[in-house]
Amino acid sequence: MKCETPTLISRLPNVGTTIFSVMSALAAQHKAVNLGQGFPDFACDPALIAHVTQAMQEGHNQYPPMPGVPLLRNAVALKIEALHARQYSAADEITITSGATQAIITAILAIVHPGDEVIVLEPCYDSYVPNIELAGGVPVRVPLTPGTFRPDFDKIAAAITPKTRAILINSPHNPSATVWSRTDMLALQALLEPTNILLISDEVYEHMVFDGAQHESAARYPGLAARAFIVSSFGKTYHVTGWKIGTVAAPASLTAEFRKVHQFNVFTVNTPMQYGLAAYMADPAHYLDLPAFYQRKRDLFRAGLRHTKFKLLPSTGSYFQCVDISDVSDLGEADFCQWLTREVGVAAIPLSAFYGNGFDQRVVRFCFAKQDETLDAALKRLKTL
């Protein structure tokens, strides 16, 4: 009997392996310092591990409530109120998710119907567009201003049609390391006010805003909060990206629809880690001190890069640093990152990977969420350029 695997028509025919996996594999192959993929190479606080261990030992090892452990949802609601002066009901408006990536696709699946349009601002994180396509939606790509990566509200307004269901924003921004200002958020609020357009606000780098600036969460703006799914990440904040735990804050009616999808694509999230995080959040210093922690690393890395031919772009938020490679190489971004990994021994990510059309502006992204020794080793190699 002849056995053949049936031919499959792909749901995502234009999607391959992510650039992050490709560059991390290349870095490992060539023993390069990996400043490509955005994850820390240092350990989290042992106290956080101790809280999770205690939760396991106390027997918190079975399914938690579908929306998340009440203690953790309450801690999240209190944090948002303290930071942004907006009250969310822990019971009806906060949901614990299996990371921010799951939170975003769940929000999209909950609100996007086939044919609905969703505005994404490029360059953007690579999960956004496939998520929209899996929901049957139509991604509408609007570029951020090249060079500054500021939102162009005239272009955003021009992209709105009667089919526009939602807009997805990200601040602090990956990959550009820029942050939206109060003026930006007020402009978005005014633009959306006469519409029924929903907002997905990706705020996973919320505690990495530098130089004394304030994170302008959508929660701070009543007209945005009333229509927003606000996404956050414990992994980014507490240096545990492998735990894949995040949160979504949204008005009760939006949360109800979100949870309809959430209960069937993940149901619940790791129980002892939720209890451990709830206990750890009792001390707000763990996130309030994070801007200074990462600003020091940013400044260390930028000081070293000034001894190279790279042109430094501003890094006002997140744990990324973008550089212009025009004075270093004639190669395009993708080829340059391959060359840099193989020949110099440092891995970076091309910004062109964050554009649907591969727009190449001679800019690459480094991640400085690394031990000082790792950054020093990378800088020593980069200074040879």
Image (cartoon, rainbow, N blue to C red):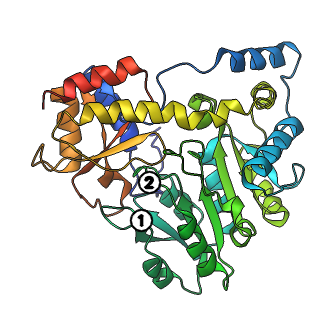
Q: What amino acid type is highlighted by mark number 2?
A: Thr
Task: Check residue 234 in the rendering and tell me which mark sits there, or answer none.
Answer: none
On the image, the x and y values in percent for residue 30 come to 24, 22
What residue would you read off at disc 1? 150
Name the residue nearer the viewer: 12 or 156: 156
Q: Earlier in the sequence, mark 1 or mark 2?
A: 1
Name the residue nearer the viewer: 31 or 375: 375
What residue would you read off at disc 2? 178
Image point 65% across, 35% down: which residue?
A: 287
| Image side of residue 306 versus residue 187, left or right | left
The quadrant in which residue 336 appears is top left
Quadrant location of the C terminus in the rendered image: top left
Q: Can residue 69 be seen in this view?
A: yes
How packed mark 1 is, by other alpha carbons closer than 10 Å (few <14, some 14-19, many 20 or more), is some
| Image side of residue 156 versus residue 108, left or right | left
Image point 65% across, 51% down: which residue?
A: 231
Name the residue nearer the viewer: 172 or 355: 172
On the image, the x and y values in percent for residue 21 come to 39, 36
Q: Can residue 263 be seen in this view?
A: no
Q: Residues at badges 1 and 2 in contact (C-beta under 8 Å)?
A: yes
